[in-house]
Image (cartoon, rainbow, N blue to C red):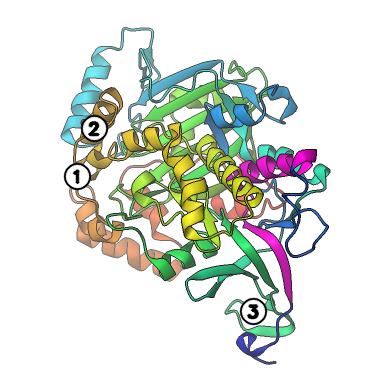
């Protein structure tokens, strides 16, 4: 077989090609397709590659379905509601208005987490408040939620279901094409201009070498490439490698979101629209969430941040310990796992913003640095970036102006800079710096940033995880001796098993009591298969 680099590739010309179908591209295509439907816009929005036809717009999504995903979300939904002013949440599967919101500090009920002196003092204070109705089950319900965290009037959403709903509206219009199960491998360059994308080769082995079924990916040429493939998408990463990041920007902060969708047990008292935010357990640095949908279904999960200084970053098991916390387990016991998954989150916010535009391309969504790291929200922000880009693109098309960097800066980036999105991202820009020096310092820093609208912050040096995560021996000092760690390493190596379970149990974490319903080993969970249902 010839090497993939030497084969002849088919090509196709379109006007606009989009990479990834998430909320940002959904906002872009929704706004653009409505303009295409407007009778007065028809002459201005005709195709340049197929004269006499409507604008040729194609979106490629790497997942098997545009609704494939396991991300629950709570959002203020300002941008989404602006696009759908008459929206009834019941129109979107699994959506519901936020009806109740709680912020809960979880104490350690098993005595295994690694808690600094300040956190232990905080635990002691909360124990002293045990007589309060809000303090029970090793937890304290905080009496208020900071304004910057509240989602008043917002929605709980299943992003998978939301994407599928938006996609169905778009495809019904007949004005845009959305192709799932079509991963894009890289952008196409002509000097410093992006001229389209290359679809991934098919029929390759695990090393990328061609097999007998090899079929080279097609080259899609377009005047504008819209990149919304998330924080670690191949096109976004290659743009960053090619152009670099703006001076002073970095993308060192990230998190793993480990998430599940659960059928709650019969008789569960949690009502649709309930939102629970947690902090403090299973480790102080790990934050959690639980969102309740109609039909006795919940999305729940934890965020394991890059500044969590543990060499044992087993997010799946940490999620199980979080679920079994008494405060949460009283609602979850007897439930059934419907689906699960994980997602990388870009937590650098505005400081992680790449070059938003260049000749022939524009970036939207999480990979463009739109996530607000103070409010912990990103869906509505991503949607809004797509809407803003579409408005700018329509402006340029109507003026018959090319998609140059200068034109896109004026039509898109300026819109973004003049919006609430930019104002709030500026407030949030340094909000989490304090976590670089500890959990409590980080909480205080977030509070200061929120109260002062970003004018006051607690600083901390940004370091890459490999620069800050200690060795196993240093991390478990006082709990496990170097000899014990060496023995665990030898035993697990001989057995061909991972060290993390053995290390955690030796350090005091209880074994997970698997029940074949909700508490399932990660290996068994991998065998569930099928379409993720939220």
Region in magenta: 11-40
Classify mark 2: helix, strand or loop.
Answer: helix
Residue placed farthest to the bottom in the image?
2
Which of the marked residues, 1 or 2, is nearer the chain's N terminus?
2
**Image marks 1 and 2: residues in contact by CB distance under 8 Å:** yes
The reply, left or right, for residue 422 in relation to residue 190 is left
The answer to which of 12 and 157 lies nearer the viewer is: 12
Which of the marked residues, 2 or 3, is nearer the chain's N terminus?
3
Classify mark 3: helix, strand or loop.
Answer: loop
**Image marks 1 and 3: residues in contact by CB distance under 8 Å:** no
Q: Which residue is mark 3?
A: 205
Q: Position of residue 91 (x, y in %)?
A: 74, 27
Q: Inspect this view and state whether residue 26 appears.
A: yes
Check the image and report above or below for 449 versus 256. Answer: above
Check the image and report above or below for 325 versus 244. Answer: above
Viewer-side label of 1, 3: 1
Say which mark, if any, is on residue 445: 2
Say which mark, if any, is on residue 376: none
Q: Which residue is mark 1?
A: 460
Give the CA separation, mark 1 to mark 3: 44 Å
The answer to which of 149 and 174 lies nearer the viewer is: 174
Q: Position of residue 452 (x, y in %)?
A: 25, 25
């Amino acid at each position: 077989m010839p090497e993939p680099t030497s084969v002849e590739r088919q090509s196709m010309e379109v006007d606009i090609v989009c990479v990834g179908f998430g909320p940002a591209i959904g906002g872009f295509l929704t706004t653009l397709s409505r303009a295409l439907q407007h009778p007065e816009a028809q002459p201005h929005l005709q195709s340049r590659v197929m004269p006499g036809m409507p604008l040729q717009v194609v979106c490629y999504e790497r997942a098997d379905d545009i609704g494939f995903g396991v991300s629950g979300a709570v959002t203020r939904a300002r941008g989404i509601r602006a696009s759908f002013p008459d929206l009834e949440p019941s129109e979107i599967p699994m959506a519901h208005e936020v009806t109740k919101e709680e912020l809960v500090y979880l104490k350690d009920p098993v005595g295994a987490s690694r808690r600094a002196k300040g956190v232990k003092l905080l635990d002691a204070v909360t124990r002293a408040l045990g007589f309060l109705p809000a303090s029970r089950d090793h937890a304290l319900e905080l009496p208020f939620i900071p304004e910057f965290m509240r989602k008043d009037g917002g929605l709980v959403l299943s992003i998978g279901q939301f994407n599928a709903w938006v996609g169905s509206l778009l495809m019904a219009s007949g004005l845009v094409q959305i192709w799932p199960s079509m991963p894009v491998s890289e952008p196409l360059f002509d000097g410093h201009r992006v001229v389209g994308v290359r679809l991934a080769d098919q029929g390759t082995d695990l090393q990328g070498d061609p097999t007998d079924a090899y079929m080279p990916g097609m080259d899609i040429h377009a005047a504008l490439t819209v990149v919304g493939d998330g924080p670690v998408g191949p096109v976004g990463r290659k743009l960053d490698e090619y152009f670099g990041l703006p001076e002073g920007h970095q993308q060192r902060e990230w998190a793993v979101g480990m998430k599940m969708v659960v059928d709650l047990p019969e008789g569960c008292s949690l009502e649709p629209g309930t939102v629970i935010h947690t902090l403090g357990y299973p480790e102080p640095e790990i934050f959690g969430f639980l969102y309740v949908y109609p039909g006795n279904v919940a999305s729940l999960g934890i965020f394991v941040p890059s500044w969590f200084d543990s060499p044992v970053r087993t997010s799946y098991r940490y999620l199980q310990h979080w679920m079994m916390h008494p405060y949460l387990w009283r609602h979850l016991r007897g439930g059934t796992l419907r689906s699960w998954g994980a997602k990388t989150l870009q937590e650098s916010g505005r400081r992680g913003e790449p070059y938003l535009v260049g000749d022939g391309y524009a970036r939207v969504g999480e990979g463009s640095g739109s996530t607000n790291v103070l409010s912990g929200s990103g869906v509505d922000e991503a949607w809004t970036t797509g809407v803003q880009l579409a408005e700018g693109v329509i402006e340029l098309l109507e003026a018959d102006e090319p998609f140059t960097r200068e034109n896109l800066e004026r039509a898109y980036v300026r819109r973004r800079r003049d919006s609430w999105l930019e104002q709030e991202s500026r407030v949030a820009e340094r909000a989490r710096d304090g976590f670089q020096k500890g959990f409590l310092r980080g909480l205080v820093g977030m509070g200061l940033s929120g109260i002062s609208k970003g004018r006051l912050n607690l600083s901390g040096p940004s370091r890459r995880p490999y620069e800050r995560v200690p060795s196993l021996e240093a991390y478990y000092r006082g709990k496990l001796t170097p000899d014990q760690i060496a023995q665990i390493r030898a035993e697990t190596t001989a057995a061909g098993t991972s060290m993390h379970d053995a290390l955690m149990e030796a350090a005091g974490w209880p074994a997970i009591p698997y029940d074949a319903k909700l508490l399932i080993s990660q290996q068994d969970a991998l065998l569930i298969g099928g379409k993720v249902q939220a």
